[in-house]
Amino acid sequence: DLLWSEDFYVEFLDPADVKDGCIPDHVKVIILPYQLVIGPLLAASLEEFTREGGTLIGTAKCGMMNDRGWYNLRIPGAGLDEVFGVKEKNVTLCTDERVIYGTKSFPAYHQRSELEIYHDAETEIVATFDSDGLPAVTRHIYGLGEAWYIGTHPGMSWLHDGKFSSIRELLVHILSSSGVERGAWLNQEKNSLAIMDLHVLQEQNERVYIVTNSSDSDLHGSIETIGVHKK
């Protein structure tokens, strides 16, 4: 819902196709949301995708088990710890923990990963946990690509904090810097009760912008566009 509401085009990839090397050429970013099961063939395809210039995003407990249900000794599993440049030393439950990203924060939902960084020179600490300052989000340069590891569950953080969570800013930054384009997005006044969504219908050179307001009050916002979209 987060990426859809920001007008990013989203596809769902079948792991069976990915592990056979069938990643479409136009795919620039692959997100593994709570992907607990990753076998060696899938991991090999993800490694190659990243090494050849793609962006890979993993979240807490990524690849915890292999495709036979056995626990992996290192997490991220199946060798992806080398791709992400980190491994999980421990995973704990959390309640009031937050992740500090720039001058803002978003909730660490349900679990937080204690990360050990492998390659200091190649791994950037992008965000930290507020309670102890340990790494919460890392970015690792791998081959021609990069791998981001988010040591909690960003999808649930988004649902918990809503449209104005800074997890939105983080993911928009990752996708935009990876060359993923969006045509239009909606800016609205910050209001926890306000729910506005932008939908774009397109046929050849004609476009219709539809804004839905799911609240009970009048709201104000603006549509920003880039590329072929016109204001």
Image (cartoon, grey):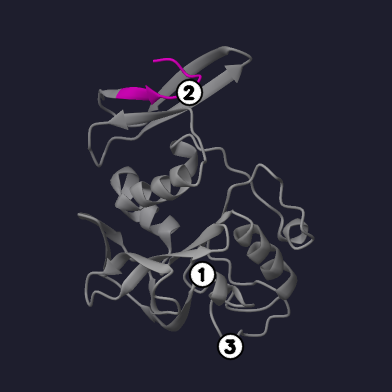
The picture quadrant where one finds residue 121 is: bottom left
The residue most toward the right is 20
Mark carried by residue 163: none
The picture quadrant where one finds residue 96 is: bottom left
* Residue 60 vertical placement versus 9 (above, below): below
Amino acid type, residue under disc 1 in the picture: Phe
Q: Which residue is mark 2?
A: 227
Are dots 1 and 3 in contact, CB under 8 Å? Answer: no
Q: Is residue 76 left or right of residue 135?
A: right
Amino acid type, residue under disc 2 in the picture: Gly
| Inter-mark Cα distance, 1 to 3 | 16 Å
Between 95 and 221, the one lying in front of the other is 221
Between 145 and 17, the one lying in front of the other is 145
Are dots 1 and 2 in contact, CB under 8 Å? Answer: no
Q: Residue at x 65, y 63 (%)?
A: 46
The picture quadrant where one finds residue 48 is: bottom right
Task: Give the percent coordinates (x, y) of residue 21.
Answer: 76, 58
Q: Which residue is mark 3?
A: 73
Which element type, helix, strand or loop, lies under badge 1? helix
Boundaries of the magenta span: 222-231
Task: Give the percent coordinates (x, y) of residue 51.
Answer: 62, 61
Between 10 and 181, the one lying in front of the other is 181
Q: Residue at x 64, y 66 (%)?
A: 47
Q: Residue at x 38, y 81 (%)?
A: 92
Image quarter in which the C terminus is found: top left
Mark carried by residue 84: 1
The answer to which of marks 2 and 3 sits earlier in the sequence is: 3
The residue most toward the top is 206
Residue 1 visible in the shown view = no
The answer to which of marks 1 and 2 sits earlier in the sequence is: 1
